[in-house]
Image (tube, rainbow, N blue to C red):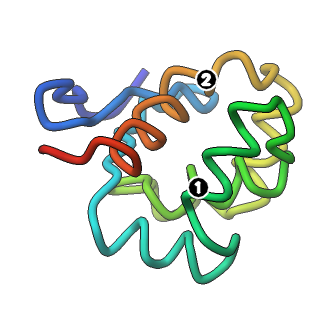
Amino acid sequence: MSGAVANEARGEAALMIGEHCLTVRPSFAALVAAERETGPLLALVERAADGRLGLAEMEALLWHCLADRPEAMARADLGDALIAQGVGVALPALRAIMRQVVAGGV
């Protein structure tokens, strides 16, 4: 297993993708990039609260918020891992992103 440790006090979360423990860091720049792809983030949070968050939206949020991705990792690898491992593995990281969108603070 490789990767950095997420700092929850900074709003970060850990995400295991294969043998890599990646840090999800919902920075302003990362959230802006995700919003360009998915549309308004508050609407996305509302859809997530209603259980209507799609796989493509999950992948986009996580991809843009990954800090220090392994160089060899392609975006398709993230999507494949979400399916292979189950989206439940990504829920803590997605919650961290949603928390940052709604509450901010770190």
Specify few, some or many for label 2: CA neighbours under 10 Å numbering under 14, 14-19, or 20 or more. some
Q: Amino acid at mark 1?
A: Leu
Q: Name the residue rendered at 28%, 35% in the picture.
A: 12
For the residue labelled by badge 2, is the local secondary structure a helix, a strand or a loop? helix
Vertical position of residue 48 compared to residue 76: above or below: above
Q: Name the residue rendered at 81%, 20% in the picture.
A: 86
Residue 67 in percent (x, y) is at 33, 54
Q: Find the residue positioned furthest to the bottom.
A: 36
Which of the pair 5/31 is nearer the observer? 31
Horizontal side, residue 44 vs residue 24: left or right:
right
Q: Which residue is mark 2?
A: 91
Q: Which residue is mark 1?
A: 61
Where residue 35 sits, quadrant-wise, is bottom right
Q: Name the residue rendered at 24%, 36% in the picture.
A: 11
Specify few, some or many for label 1: CA neighbours under 10 Å numbering under 14, 14-19, or 20 or more. many
Q: How many marks?
A: 2
For the residue labelled by badge 1, is the local secondary structure a helix, a strand or a loop? helix
